[in-house]
Image (cartoon, rainbow, N blue to C red):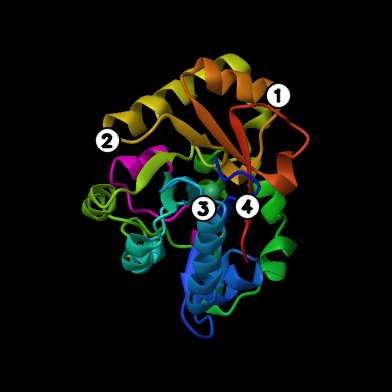
């Protein structure tokens, strides 16, 4: 899969200059400009054709359930070698459109003109937040009086997920809880990953797992395999040292 070609990992996609919360995502390297992205994906498709790779054999992955890639659906119809793939959290596979903790924080920062540095002065960094389970991340944001956003139009609705799947998009799992899972208890982890696997296959997705934050270890990968995941995806910058035939290292395109 994607032999010698990168496996892009994408999040948000903006048009023209990034506005509102896109500005923060862009500055953190997780929002790309649409025209620029179309150009890069065109090139990726062309490279795959030159290498005579089979149709839909080059994965292009989108994490975190953003609605942004929907605008690319018409392009993917003509990029015959590329296979768009969504990695959704377990809640998103059941139609939950709430913002994950960090996007919730970015939304609030951009709405109130508060800088991330200011938030971090309050005693919690992005890095530390990523280590906590989602529930605890949300509770910490509650204490800062950051509003919860439970039905964001920026997150894919169940019907949109179905439409994309009907167009041939693959859906995989982004785990049962969006945090760094490397320190979780191995027995609990395997059990929770099994639930995430069942949730994604129940809606017609594949038993594929993209590790939250791209972080995994040899033992978490083994737990995922035992939980029934047939393919796993990390981020090269986070987990390149782990080599397994069922693990794909992706590159964030920014
Ligand atoms: Zn993610």
Q: Which residue is mark 4?
A: 6
Q: Which comes sooner in the sequence, label 1 or label 3?
A: 3
Task: Let me know if residue 107 appears in the view.
Answer: no
**Within 10 angstroms of label 2, few (less than 14), some, or many (20 or more) residues?**
some
Q: Which residue is mark 2?
A: 203
**Disc with the residue nearer the chain's start (4 vs 2):** 4
> Which residues are the magenta region?
88-104
Per the model, the C-alpha gap separating discs 3 and 2 is 24 Å
> Mark 4 and mark 2: span between their CA atoms?
28 Å
Residue for point 33% across, 29% down: 201
Residue pointed to by mark 1? 218
Name the residue nearer the viewer: 4 or 192: 4
Q: Which residue is mark 3?
A: 101
Instruction: Give the x, y percent position of residue 174.
Output: 48, 40
Q: Answer yes or no: disc 4 within 8 Å of ligand 1.
A: no
Q: Is residue 73 visible?
A: yes
Instruction: Kindly indicate the quadrant of the structure image that contains residue 211.
Output: top right
From the viewer's perspective, tell me whether residue 149 is left or right of residue 237: left
Q: Marks 1 and 4, Cα distance to the nearest angstrom?
A: 22 Å
């Amino acid at each position: 899969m994607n032999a010698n070609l990168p496996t892009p990992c994408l999040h948000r996609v903006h048009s023209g200059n990034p506005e509102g919360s896109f500005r923060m995502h862009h500055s953190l390297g997780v929002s790309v400009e649409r025209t620029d992205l179309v150009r890069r994906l065109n090139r990726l498709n062309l490279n795959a054709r030159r290498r005579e790779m089979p149709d839909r054999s080059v994965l292009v992955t989108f994490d975190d359930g953003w609605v942004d890639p929907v605008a690319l659906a018409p392009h993917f119809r003509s990029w015959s070698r590329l296979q768009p793939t969504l990695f959704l959290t377990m809640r998103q596979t059941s139609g939950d459109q709430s913002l994950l903790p960090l996007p919730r924080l970015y939304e609030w920062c951009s709405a109130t003109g508060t800088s991330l540095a200011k938030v971090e002065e309050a005693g919690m960094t992005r890095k530390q937040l990523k280590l906590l389970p989602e529930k605890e991340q949300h509770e910490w944001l509650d204490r800062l009086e950051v509003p919860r956003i439970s039905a964001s139009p920026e997150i894919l609705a169940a019907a949109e997920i179905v439409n994309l799947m009907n167009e041939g998009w693959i859906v995989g799992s982004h785990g049962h809880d969006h945090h760094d899972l490397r320190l979780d208890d191995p027995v609990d982890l395997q059990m929770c990953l099994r639930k995430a696997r069942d949730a994604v296959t129940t809606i017609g997705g594949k038993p594929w797992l993209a590790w939250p934050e791209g972080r995994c270890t040899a033992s978490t990968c083994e737990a995922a395999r035992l939980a029934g995941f047939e393919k796993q995806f990390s981020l090269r910058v986070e987990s390149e040292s782990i080599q397994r035939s069922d693990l794909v290292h992706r590159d964030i395109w920014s």
